[in-house]
Amino acid sequence: MPREALRPELAQARAGGMANIGEAARASGVSAKMIRHYESIGLMPAVGRTFAGYRLYSGKDIHRLSFIRRARALGFSTPDIAALLGLWDNRRRSSAQVKKLAQKHVDELAERIAQMQAMQRTLAALAAQCHGDERPDCPILDDLALDGLPLDDEES
Amino acid sequence: MPREALRPELAQARAGGMANIGEAARASGVSAKMIRHYESIGLMPAVGRTFAGYRLYSGKDIHRLSFIRRARALGFSTPDIAALLGLWDNRRRSSAQVKKLAQKHVDELAERIAQMQAMQRTLAALAAQCHGDERPDCPILDDLALDGLPLDDEES
DNA sequence: GTTGCACCTTGCCATGATGGCAAGGTCAAG
DNA sequence: CTTGACCTTGCCATCATGGCAAGGTGCAAC
């Protein structure tokens, strides 16, 4: 009793299902470091603290962290995740808003994929022409060493 | 021919076919900033200077810059570019070494592409199920908000 | 020959997600 | 009381890139 009176917040917090940052990290799959980072950039709210300054996370906070982790796993940018969280929080959202964000991201992914596939195609074609033996001649190097600017050529 | 060790004046250097960093940047498509950066990390040699300290680039130097730019456009990492430049410089290289580097990069690209395609597939599937209307219900948010995670479980 | 503009130099700051380390406080158990 | 695990803040580093600032240089026009 006197003991709890001295440090009531931590004792009550634990009893009330609150977790410290390490537990929140384990539960959400987000590192403690990144949890603090998300707080600093506003993706996570400034959670409660004990007298000693320890952060306290509720089940809801941990849920939010998991949400962020999943969104990141799908490749969403930080601003997009902020927007998604805002929509998640907003009961008056329209699913159209969510879908629009998702669609934008799908399109961005498509573009990045296309760029990498172009690189891959070019390189695979060059590699296919390369003997791959003891001789030094190699169309890969020849291509890299070409004179002139193939992508955008404008200076003169 | 070793590089000019005598630090000639700019005018003389120009007459000798040497370019200053701005010209080298325009000719190679690499920004002056990045040219200095490549020098600092050893991708480019420490080129000659005028008395005043201006860097002087030969046609060969500019060719090397173009090579770097092309390699970057194909997505090669800095260490890989360093390796490619080493092979380019080495007349006793085997094309097999070059091909191996290229193949490794093709494989890395394939992996990154596969990861992004997986994200894209997941997201596209979710988006397809989303009404996209005024209603707030949205399978995209529902998925992001799922409890449980594939790596770890709840607090113990 | 002076002025002015464009260009050069170095160096520091910032991005963005992430990890690492250090110094110091806190807590729980022996 | 000691110990070890965990918390706090804060700074450093990555990597490629751009931006800005302060100060020197080159060249052409007046």
Image (cartoon, coloured by chain):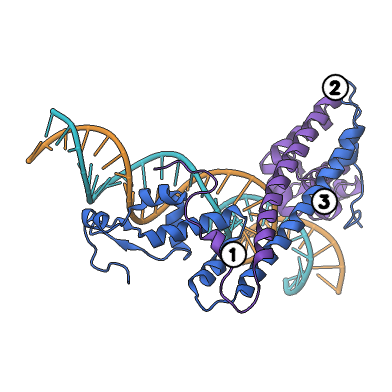
Chain colours: A purple, B blue, C orange, D cyan
Q: Are marks 3 and 1 in contact (CB under 8 Å)?
A: no
- For the N terminus of chain B, the quadrant is bottom left
Q: Which residue is mark 1?
A: A139
What residue is drawn where x is 86% and y is 50%?
Answer: A11
Residue A55 is marked as none
Instruction: Please tell me whether mark 3 sits on a helix, a strand or a loop.
Output: helix
Instruction: Please tell me whether mark 1 sits on a helix, a strand or a loop.
Output: helix
What residue is drawn where x is 53% and y is 48%?
Answer: A150
The spot of residue B68 in percent (x, y) is 51, 58
Residue A92 is marked as 2
10 Å crowding of disc 3: few (<14), some (14-19), many (20+): many
Q: CA distance from mark 3 to mark 1?
A: 53 Å
Q: CA distance from mark 3 to mark 2?
A: 29 Å
Q: Say which amino acid is labelled 1.
A: Pro
* Nearest to N terminus: mark 3 or mark 2: 3
* Nearest to N terminus: mark 3 or mark 1: 3
The spot of residue B65 in percent (x, y) is 46, 57
Residue B77 relative to residue B113: left or right: left
Can residue A57 be seen at all in this image of the molecule?
no
10 Å crowding of disc 2: few (<14), some (14-19), many (20+): few
Say which chain tag 2 marks. Answer: A
Q: Nearer the viewer, mark 3 or mark 1?
A: 1
What residue is drawn where x is 37% and y is 48%?
Answer: B22
The spot of residue D12 in percent (x, y) is 53, 59
Residue A24 is marked as 3
Say which chain tag 1 marks. Answer: A
Q: Say which amino acid is labelled 2.
A: Arg
* Front position in the image: B96 or B115: B96
Q: Could you say which quadrant of the image residue A78 lies in?
A: top right
* Front position in the image: C2 or A78: C2
Q: Say which amino acid is labelled 3.
A: Ala
* Front position in the image: A5 or B92: B92
